[in-house]
Amino acid sequence: MKPPLLDAIQQRYACRQFIADRPVSADALAVLLEAGRLAPSAFGLEPWRFVIVTDAAGKAAIAHACFGQPAATTAAAFIAIVALVDELDPDSDYVRARFEAEARGADAAPIYDAYRVHYQADSITAWAQGQCNFAAAQMLLQAAHLGLGSCPIGGFDAAALTSVLKLPPGETPALVIALGHCSYPAPERLRKPLD
Ligand SMILES: Cc1cc2nc3c(=O)[nH]c(=O)nc-3n(C[C@H](O)[C@H](O)[C@H](O)COP(=O)(O)O)c2cc1C
């Protein structure tokens, strides 16, 4: 028997054209959020926020911010993954709450000490966006497991997307996931050989 997770990994591909008028159910979107929520993150900081967009006007605005790429213009739904950048300041209430949780009742000071050594203000945005990719990967695989098509989209105008998503200062878009039912079967996978 093929392991189910490997099955989903093999089935997933970046779909660039979704079938019109085939929505993604609210139940499926909830499952995808749960898959993202449970993703690992460095220091357990979970520096992300997930924004679901399914309304026609919102989708059109996101597609525009994604330069009109076909995966975006035909998507039935989007999950935008937003990086929480300012919350990662070592002195923020957010970090304090996360580290208290991460310490599970023990002293959180060692986690703080390690994080203060690690934290670099000038590269924290890219670091936070990198964390978001773990949540994205879990959502993409969960979508494949549900029989949904998906396309991760990193090609967007960050300022336009920030405006569309009405992000507050300190938050920045990391990745957009376009979702729907793909209009064509899986193409041949192009990958380097294992060796
Ligand atoms: C971080 C990231 C950003 C991506 N951005 C785009 C994008 O803007 N537009 C697009 O069509 N595909 C995008 N892709 C999809 C890749 O092109 C695709 O995953 C790759 O070519 C491998 O193909 P496969 O996913 O079908 O196996 C992105 C993938 C990742 C991981």
Image (tube, helix red, strand yellow):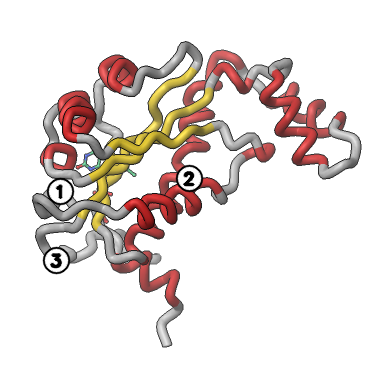
The extreme top residue here reads 169
In which quadrant of the rendered view does residue 63 lie?
Answer: top left
Q: Secondary structure at mark 1?
A: loop
- Give the Cα separation between the discs numbered 2 and 3: 25 Å
Left or right relative to 71: residue 96: right
Count of numbered tags: 3
Question: Which one is nearer the viewer's eye here, 50 or 102?
Answer: 50
Q: Secondary structure at mark 3?
A: loop
* Label 3 neighbour load within 10 Å: few <14, some 14-19, many 20+: few
In which quadrant of the rendered view does residue 144 lie?
Answer: bottom left
Say if 169 sits above or below 42 in the image: above
The residue at 31%/42% (across/down) is: 177
Q: Is mark 2 within 8 Å of ligand 1?
A: no
- Give the Cα separation between the discs numbered 3 and 1: 11 Å
Q: Position of residue 40 (x, y in %)?
A: 59, 47
| Quarter of image, ligand 1 | top left
The extreme bottom residue here reads 1
Label 1, on which residue? 16
Q: Position of residue 97 (x, y in %)?
A: 73, 29
Question: Which one is nearer the viewer's eye here, 182 or 53?
Answer: 53
> Which numbered circle lies on residue 135?
2
Mark 3: amino acid: Pro
The residue at 55%/14% (across/down) is: 122
> Which numbered circle lies on residue 185?
3
Q: Is mark 1 within 8 Å of ligand 1?
A: yes
